[in-house]
Image (cartoon, coloured by chain):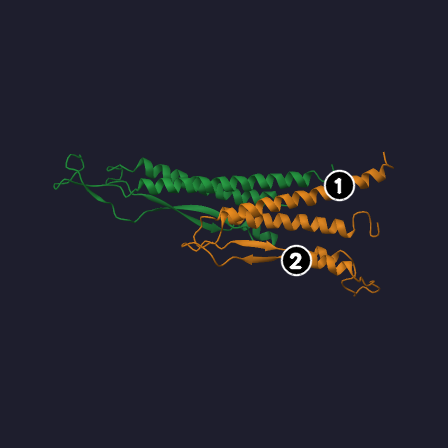
Chain colours: A orange, B green
Amino acid sequence: MPSGLTGTETYQLLARALDLRARAQERIADNLANQDTPGYKARRLDFQDALRGALGQEGTLRPAATRPGHFGATGSDAIRHVKGTEEVVRDGGGPDGNTVAPEEEMARMAENSVMFDAAAQIIGAKYRSLKYVIREGR
Amino acid sequence: MDIGTLLQISGSALGAQKRRLEVVAENLAGAEVTHTADGGPYRRKDVVFKTFHDHLNDARGERAPDLVKAEVALDPRPLPLVHDPGHPDADADGNVRMPNVNVTEEMMNMISASRSYEANVKAVGAAKQMARAALRIGE
């Protein structure tokens, strides 16, 4: 493993995905909580493209950092800085101006927690294989 | 992973929806009451949901979660006048002021409140499951 045992791109990506999924869950909880608040505008966190973009950046050319001022050289930085963008749903509300669609939020919540679970499982599996190697295969 | 924030959001909503159910129960109980402690017929109560922010969350430097609370207000709609000469509270013309509660409306409100409550219970469940998944890392 090139940059430390857990500093690889995969670990960074999984860790970031966990964090962003947790944030997305906060927005979903907000929306579900405010489904009866007049005038409330639903929000969602959009980060998949940004994360994919950051990954692509690293998959290609990675310049060497030869001086302290060089930026974008350490592999995992781009991933670590992915924040995602918050999108506000303004259209399609009911007569009270509330744009939360509860069934949509429930579906999104199910998807989000499954994806969170998946990332947690993969990261756990990676640690397990690391442990296995440390124990010399026992 | 901040399970506390998630529980705070859904918890505020559970409390607000429960308040709404309580108000529905009060309205149904008062639907025929022509003589309240303050005198006069019962006036329907209505719940208005409002978003608020807990300042403790501002310290995180991120957008604070949108917590929700239920505010109770009196329904300003007029009290209907019903002709019922046999009623003890009837006036000289035999008319009685009745509460402005519509039972059908209350039943709809009740169903809506319990559905919203359920959705927020599901959100609490999802938060718990996510926290558990995170804790299993490295096992």
State whether residue A27 appears in this view.
Answer: yes
The residue sitting at 45% across, 42% down in the picture is: B17
Q: Name the spot of residue B55 as percent of width and height, x first.
A: 54, 51
Chain to which mark 2 belongs:
A
Residue B56 visible, this angle:
no
Pointer 2 local density, CA inside 10 Å: few below 14, some 14–19, many at least 20 = few
Which SS class for mark 2? helix
Q: What percent of the width, then of the height, locates residue B43?
A: 29, 43
Left or right for A107, reference A118: left
As helix, strand or loop, the secondary structure at mark 1 comes to helix
Q: Which mark is residue A125?
A: 1
Mark 1 Cα shell of 10 Å, populated few (<14), some (14-19), many (≥20): some
Would you identify the image quadrant in which residue B129 lies?
A: top right
Amino acid on which disc 1 is placed:
Ala
In this picture, residue A22 sits left or right of residue A3: left
Q: CA distance from mark 1 to mark 2?
A: 25 Å
Instruction: Give the image quarter of residue A135.
Output: top right
Residue contact at pointers 1 and 2, CB within 8 angstroms: no
x 54%, y 44%: residue: B8
Report whether A65 appears left or right of A85: right
| Quadrant that contains the C terminus of chain A | top right
Q: Which residue is mark 2?
A: A49
Q: Amino acid at mark 2?
A: Asp
Label 1: chain letter: A
Question: Residue B110: percent from the left, percent from the top?
Answer: 40, 40
